[in-house]
Amino acid sequence: MTLGAAGPSGTGPSATAPVTAQVLPGWVQADGSRVAALELSLAPGWKTYWRAPGDAGIPPEFNWSESKNLGGVTIHWPTPQVFDTSGMRTLGYTDRLVIPLAIAPQRAGQPVHLNAEMNLGICSDICMPYALSFDAVLQGTDTRPTPAIAAALAQQPFTSDEGRVSAATCRVEPTADGLWIEARITMPSAGGAEVVVIEPGQPDIWVSEAESQRQGQDVVAVAEMMQVNGQMIALDRSAIRLTVLGTSHAVDIQGCTPD
């Protein structure tokens, strides 16, 4: 297994790197798929970002194209922290981050060679893009869960059923630049001042930071949507992903219905 890191200058890894990574090989499941993970260690004072980082963050990107015997990868993100800096809200992680990966091999029972790159944003006094490369062969038949990966899986947001979501609606109205959207989620409180993140599920649509508030049994979030190329938006409500972040837990909701 080999790992490398390169900052904007491409100078390669060093003892003072703000983030380092390793692959946790994980275990094999009954269907022949594998649960593995990327473990990122951030230097004190540094943070990195969730899949939806907020307007001031840099979203992580993965390139798996050089891997071998890799049929598919599903990333399971642990619940992020909410950061408020100079009036800007971002979502991410500090210290240590374990990102579980559900890996489907093309040929069951054969090793999977992960040869990939992760481009991410990291932030301290300054924010910058950063690249991590990793090269690992995942093999063996161990079926015992790795504690660090199992713990990270347990830190995922609740599903709609687990969060007792009884309804999720999205009302949209046209604006001069795109769409205004109001998401209304009927569910018990997730604790504290809940933050709702709206992801459009379509890469060509930008969504502003949502304004969220609790209204009785509902948590309501309002945001603006724009098509990044300035075209009209063809919104697919079933692709919208809503995440409610509270102080006690988070809830992940896939899709919403018209109001």
Image (cartoon, rainbow, N blue to C red):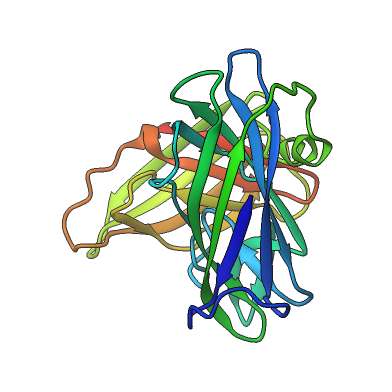
The residue most toward the bottom is: 125
Q: Is residue 248 above or below residue 188?
A: below
Q: Is residue 159 above or below residue 45?
A: above
Q: Quadrant of the C terminus?
A: top left
Q: Is residue 180 above or below residue 143?
A: below
Point 60% across, 78% down: residue: 87
The residue most toward the right is: 147
Q: Does 181 sit left or right of 22 as displayed?
A: left
Q: Position of residue 138 (x, y in %)?
A: 61, 35
Q: Observer-nearest residue: 134 or 212? A: 134
Q: Position of residue 94 (x, y in %)?
A: 73, 65
Quarter-of-image position of residue 166 = top right
Point 51% across, 27% down: residue: 104
Q: Observer-nearest residue: 120 or 104? A: 104
* Res 13 visible: yes
Q: Position of residue 162 (x, y in %)?
A: 70, 26
Q: Does 5 sit left or right of 169 as displayed?
A: right
* Res 60 visible: no
Q: Is residue 97 above or below residue 255?
A: below
Point 65% across, 13% down: residue: 30
Q: Position of residue 59 (x, y in %)?
A: 49, 61
Point 75% across, 73% down: residue: 43
Q: Observer-nearest residue: 229 or 129? A: 129
Q: Does 239 sit left or right of 231 as displayed?
A: right
Quarter-of-image position of residue 85 = bottom right
